[in-house]
Image (spheres, grey):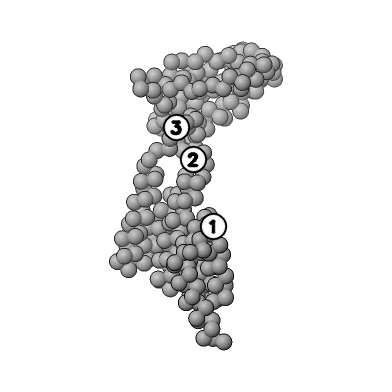
Amino acid sequence: MAQVPVRPSGLPPGMSLPPGMSLPQGPGGPPMQIQVNPALQALLDSLPTKDVPFTLQQQPIANSQPPQSNTLVVCPVHKQSTCEICSVDFTPLNYMHQFLRSAPSEAIPPPPQVQPPAQRAEAIKAAKEQGNAAFKNQNFPMAIQHYSRSADMALSRPPWELAAVSRDETAIALCNRSAAFAFAGAWANALADAEAVVTLKRPWTKGHFRKSRALVGLGRLEEARDALIDGLQFEPNDKELNAFLKEIDEKLASEE
């Protein structure tokens, strides 16, 4: 394993971060020091290593305007990234370096214990509130658009952020969109969103209520009743579910 010298910036010589990215800074300005697990460090130190000589070489990028180049790790003798004579293959390392330079910032996990930026949560909330405003004005197509945007942003959170946050944000957006679809008379869409909400947050009674409402709109009263019973097992005294259950029972009794 090559011993790569590290600069104060925290990167090996010749290596650079993708445009727009920077290492986390501490209060005094230098890069933040990440705590190392002693047991993991001891395990890594116990692994057999081998010093592999290398050098860095600039390779021009064809047809790039203005002219640009890539930094490649190559063998110092033959200046090849893959060299059978030197028994080295730096291709995976070079590939990773180019990926990190060209990948969007969200594709690169942040250091541990770094809080996700608040901008996404604020944008998700803003889209939801815009949907609520359109819903109150009975502009249901516009409300559906805003709720869809809120759900899309929630679902696009990077995988290393807390899944529970994305799940809650998505469930709220879909629950609201289900209501908007219902008021627009799109019962099948309202049911699809409600079922997704129940899957995401089964103990949340609002999802069961939306599902039951959509099933009533589709004329499937027995299934609507079952949806309410499913929700009541989590909140037996929920007034909204019990009132709607009574309404459905009366409809079923009148059809007999």
Q: Identify the residue shown where x is 40% and y is 71%.
A: 183
Tell me the kind of residue under disc 1. Answer: Arg
Amino acid type, residue under disc 3 in the picture = Val
Q: Residue at x 56, y 29 (%)?
A: 96
Q: CA distance from mark 3 to mark 2?
A: 10 Å
User: Is residue 160 placed above or below 137 in the rendered structure?
Assistant: above
SS at circle 3: loop
- Image height check: is 130 above or below 40? below
Return the residue at label 3: 114
Mark 3 / mark 2, whichever is N-terminal = 3
Task: Please tell me how crowded label 1 is: few (under 14), some (14-19), or many (20+) other residues with Cα within 10 Å.
Answer: some
Q: Are marks 1 and 3 in contact (CB under 8 Å)?
A: no
- Please give the count of numbered marks on the rendered protein: 3
Tell me the SS state at disc 1: loop
First in residue order: circle 2 vs circle 1: 2
Q: Could you tell me how far apart the alpha carbons at marks 1 and 3 are, in whole angstroms?
A: 30 Å
Residue 188 can be seen in this image:
no
Residue ID at (43%, 15%): 8
Could you give the CA–CA distance between mark 2 and mark 1, rounded to whole angstroms?
A: 22 Å
Up the image or down, 10 lies above or below 143; here it is above
The quadrant of the rendering that contains the N terminus is top right
Name the residue at 67% across, 16% down: 46
Residue 97: x %, y % from top left: 53, 27
Which residue position holds label 2? 161
Q: Residue 15: image x %, image y %? A: 48, 22
Considering depth in this image, is 130 or 194 the residue closer to the camera?
Answer: 194
Q: Which residue is mark 1?
A: 202
The one of 29 and 241 positioned closer to us in this rendering: 241
Q: Nearer the viewer, mark 2 or mark 1?
A: 1
Residue 142 drawn above or below residue 66: below
- Answer few, some or many: residues within 10 Å of disc 3's Cα (few below 14, many 20 plus, some between 14 and 19): few
